[in-house]
Image (tube, coloured by chain):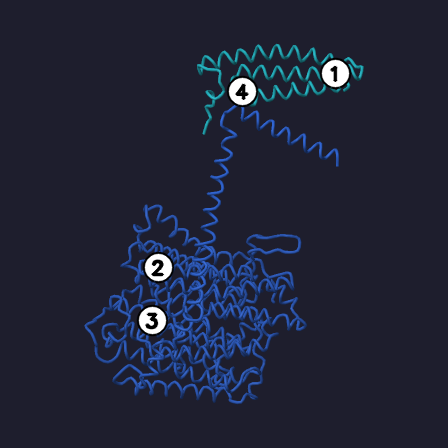
Chain colours: A blue, B cyan
């Protein structure tokens, strides 16, 4: 860890979104006497300004770090201070968290701005903007905290806010169900987080990253394997990895900006962030890391294949996110944290762009999400089409768009790192190939060809198109922060800026570039070929119909491998059955009867005891006599024995 | 039988008869008499003990009890008169206002 510099900047990054939340959540509704009477433009503008201001502060912090100072550190307050245990809200803006903070506040600002347009038809969107601000606040706590306990606070905070945002339109029971599902599946993962914290505290007596870093040595490797497994479990929940990815596609029930913010740019990357932050721990559990890599690769394949057969435009993007997160886990698993963070960043650019573009399409089509009813929207939505095209090229991995560099880096690391293998590389390459196919299908179904139903959309207002354009620029040029070494040397560009930036916090991947089975250039060529082949295959497959050539396969993919149904049968139904059983026997018979018995018993004894208080002198006298006799008898007994 | 024991038995019997009167008779006047009877039973045993142990304090106690008994019967009788005025009877079963 680099030295700590006291600074108030991290605190302000946090406080500004919180101020926005307080304004939109409390002050504004109180002033207008009711949240439904709030003014959308005012609340949206305040929320956006809060995020922009936070971004400016984050940028200032970033500049200070770039100027060579150590991590910026704030002690806000001491929460727990016992003799040997102290936890405070200590904020720390170092090289890793500054990138995260810039992504959250920067893309967050754009999404807030976009939301003003997207939510303009809503009544009283102050609630929405309050949730958005609160979400960003929680996410910033997650990335800025310098100890695990407050990371967990943020971790739970984003969980809560995602619940609130997914069920923003709570009138529909499907939305409420989706929100509950997201919340509960995340809780399953959080269980692992809590246990991991307990284990770490039991062994090391601290939860601070810096202290853990200095205390953990290879001697603890066997103990830490358990911790690593639990933390990984937590990360699978938050970052929608197999087997806990099922909540993310359902979470598309929320408003589209929410999908862009939560499910593309911020919350789902929390797991990747956790890995990068705790790398010193995970490095001591190589078996777990190999599992992480394979789970990531597997998730990338599952998400990619399911995305092939979805007809809801947001569902395609949701499974695409699952798949891309799989790439990030693949990278962390082999130990290439910088590649994971790099892909996290470029993915935040292009996936936020794609989601917002999809939102623009949905907005134009009056809430229609089924791509089978779209088609031919290119003319009606020129800006949306152009920006979505750029985002798609980026995610497909077309050269010189951002996704090309980050995905290539991951594919290269998958085979070049000591823990990598050709198997992982192949899985990643297939997933990359699938990405091109389903992205092409989405574009083809939505924008190209002839209009299939009478939907004739209109271009969105500037508050929505401006963020699209900015994100399109980022998605185009963002990749130049991580140009691979070989290419950089041949054209004279700076190589791996992001990797170098992260090196003080997260050690760079130590590997011999020339010892890899496939060189960087080879990987790039293969990846380009796969992308082009994917697009070509998409063009052939989806020329006339948009379903897969094999109906049974299409059905399997459309049904998402029936994983939800399996969970339903294996976990949900038995739990319901147990709950029913308890309700009927324990609750229905035992507890209810116990209650009745207690009532019957007290009224019976009351009936008997009532005579004592009847006001009859003789009875009083008799009772006194009885008590007296008892006392005499007892005292006689005690004195005799 | 020794006179002392006989006197003790008599005093206990008096006490118990007084107690019995209190417990079973419904007439408040009789109950008051029962109380006096109990006091006299106690007096008797005090006197007997004083005689047996050759100590004056027991006899002294009896004087106090007689005084208090006089005061008690005065108070008791006035309560009794009030009860009669309020309830029209001095039977205890008429005064059970708390009867459930």
For mark 2, what is the residue?
A168
Mark 4: secondary structure: loop
Which mark is nearer the camera, 2 or 1?
A: 1
Foreground label between 3 and 1: 1
Q: Mark 2 vs mark 1: same chain? A: no
Asked whether disc 3 touches disc 1, contact meaning CB atoms under 8 Å apart, the reply is no
Name the quadrant of the C terminus of chain A.
Answer: top right
Coordinates of residue A463 in the picture (x, y in percent): 31, 63
Q: What is the distance, in whole Å, between disc 4 and disc 1 at their CAs? A: 29 Å
Gap between marks 2 and 4, in whole Å?
80 Å
Which residue does the numbered mark 1 point to in the structure image?
B48
Chain letter of the residue carrying label 4: B
* Image spot of residue A187 (x, y percent): 47, 63
**A616 left or right of A172 in image:** right
How many marks do you count on the picture?
A: 4
User: Badge 3: few (under 14), some or many (20 or more) residues near its Cα, within 10 Å?
Assistant: many
Q: Is residue A487 above or below residue A458?
A: below
Q: Which residue is mark 3?
A: A314
Tell me residue A564's x, y (percent). 40, 72
């Amino acid at each position: 860890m680099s030295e700590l510099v006291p600074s108030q900047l991290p605190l302000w990054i946090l406080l500004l979104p919180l101020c926005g939340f307080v304004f939109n959540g409390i002050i504004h509704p109180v002033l207008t006497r009711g949240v439904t009477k709030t003014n959308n433009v005012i609340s949206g503008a305040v929320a956006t300004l809060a995020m922009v201001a936070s971004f400016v502060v984050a940028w200032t912090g970033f500049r200070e770090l770039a100027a060579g100072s150590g991590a910026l550190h704030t002690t806000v307050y001491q929460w727990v201070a016992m003799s040997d245990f102290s936890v405070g809200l200590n904020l720390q803006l170092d090289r890793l968290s500054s990138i995260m903070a810039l992504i959250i506040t920067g893309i967050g600002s754009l999404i807030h701005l976009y939301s003003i347009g997207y939510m303009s038809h809503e009544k009283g969107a102050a609630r929405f903007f309050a949730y958005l601000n609160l979400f960003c606040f929680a996410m910033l706590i997650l990335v800025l905290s310098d100890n695990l306990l407050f990371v967990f606070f943020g971790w739970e905070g984003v969980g809560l806010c995602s619940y609130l945002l997914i069920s923003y339109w709570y009138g529909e029971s499907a939305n409420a169900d989706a929100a509950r599902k997201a919340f509960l599946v995340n809780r399953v993962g959080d269980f692992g987080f809590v246990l991991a914290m307990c284990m770490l505290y039991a062994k090391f007596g601290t939860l601070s990253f810096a202290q853990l870093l200095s205390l953990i040595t290879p001697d603890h490797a066997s103990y830490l394997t358990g911790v690593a497994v639990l933390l990984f479990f937590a990360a699978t929940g938050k970052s929608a990895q197999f087997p806990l990815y099922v909540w993310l596609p359902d979470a598309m029930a929320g408003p589209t900006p929410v999908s862009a913010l939560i499910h593309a740019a911020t919350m789902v990357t929390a797991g990747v962030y956790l890995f990068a932050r705790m790398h010193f721990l995970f490095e001591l559990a190589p078996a777990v890391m190999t599992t992480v890599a394979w789970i990531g690769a597997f998730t990338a394949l599952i998400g990619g294949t399911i995305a092939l057969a979805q007809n809801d435009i947001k569902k395609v993007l949701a499974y695409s996110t699952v798949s891309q997160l799989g790439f990030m886990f693949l990278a962390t698993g082999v130990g290439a944290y910088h590649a994971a963070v790099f892909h996290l960043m470029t993915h935040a650019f292009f996936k936020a762009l794609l989601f917002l573009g999809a939102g623009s399409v949905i907005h134009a089509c009056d809430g229609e999400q089924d791509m089978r009813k779209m088609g031919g929207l290119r003319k009606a939505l020129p800006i949306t089409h152009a920006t979505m095209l750029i985002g798609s090229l980026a995610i497909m991995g077309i050269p010189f768009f951002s996704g090309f560099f980050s995905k290539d880096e991951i594919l290269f690391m998958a085979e070049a790192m000591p823990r990598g293998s050709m198997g992982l590389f192949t899985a990643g390459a297939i997933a990359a190939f699938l990405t091109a196919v389903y992205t092409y299908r989405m574009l083809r179904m939505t924008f190209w060809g002839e209009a299939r139903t009478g939907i004739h959309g209109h271009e969105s207002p500037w508050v929505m198109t401006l963020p699209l354009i900015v994100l399109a620029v980022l998605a185009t040029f963002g990749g130049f922060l991580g140009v691979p070494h070989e290419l950089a040397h041949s054209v004279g560009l700076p190589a791996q800026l992001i990797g170098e930036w992260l090196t003080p916090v997260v050690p760079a991947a130590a590997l011999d570039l020339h010892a890899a089975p496939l060189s960087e250039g080879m990987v790039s060529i293969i990846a380009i070929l796969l992308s082009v082949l994917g697009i070509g295959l998409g063009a052939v497959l989806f020329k006339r119909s948009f379903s897969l050539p094999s109906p049974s396969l299409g059905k399997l993919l459309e049904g998402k491998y029936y994983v939800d149904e399996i969970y339903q049968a294996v976990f949900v139904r038995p739990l319901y059955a147990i709950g029913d059983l308890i309700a009927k026997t324990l609750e229905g018979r035992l507890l209810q009867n116990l209650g009745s018995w207690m009532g019957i018993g007290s009224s019976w004894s009351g009936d008997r005891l009532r005579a004592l208080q009847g006001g009859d002198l003789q009875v009083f006298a008799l009772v006194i006599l009885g008590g007296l006799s008892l006392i005499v008898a007892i005292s006689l007994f005690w004195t005799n024995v | 039988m020794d006179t002392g024991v006989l006197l003790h038995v008599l005093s206990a019997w008096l006490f118990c008869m007084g107690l019995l009167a209190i417990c079973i008779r419904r007439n408040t006047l009789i109950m008051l008499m029962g109380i006096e009877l109990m006091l006299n039973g106690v007096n008797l045993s005090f006197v007997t003990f004083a005689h047996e142990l050759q100590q004056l304090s027991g006899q002294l106690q009896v004087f106090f009890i007689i005084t208090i008994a006089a005061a008690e019967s005065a108070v008791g009788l006035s309560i009794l008169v009030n009860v009669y005025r309020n309830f029209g009877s001095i039977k205890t079963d008429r005064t059970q206002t708390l009867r459930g």
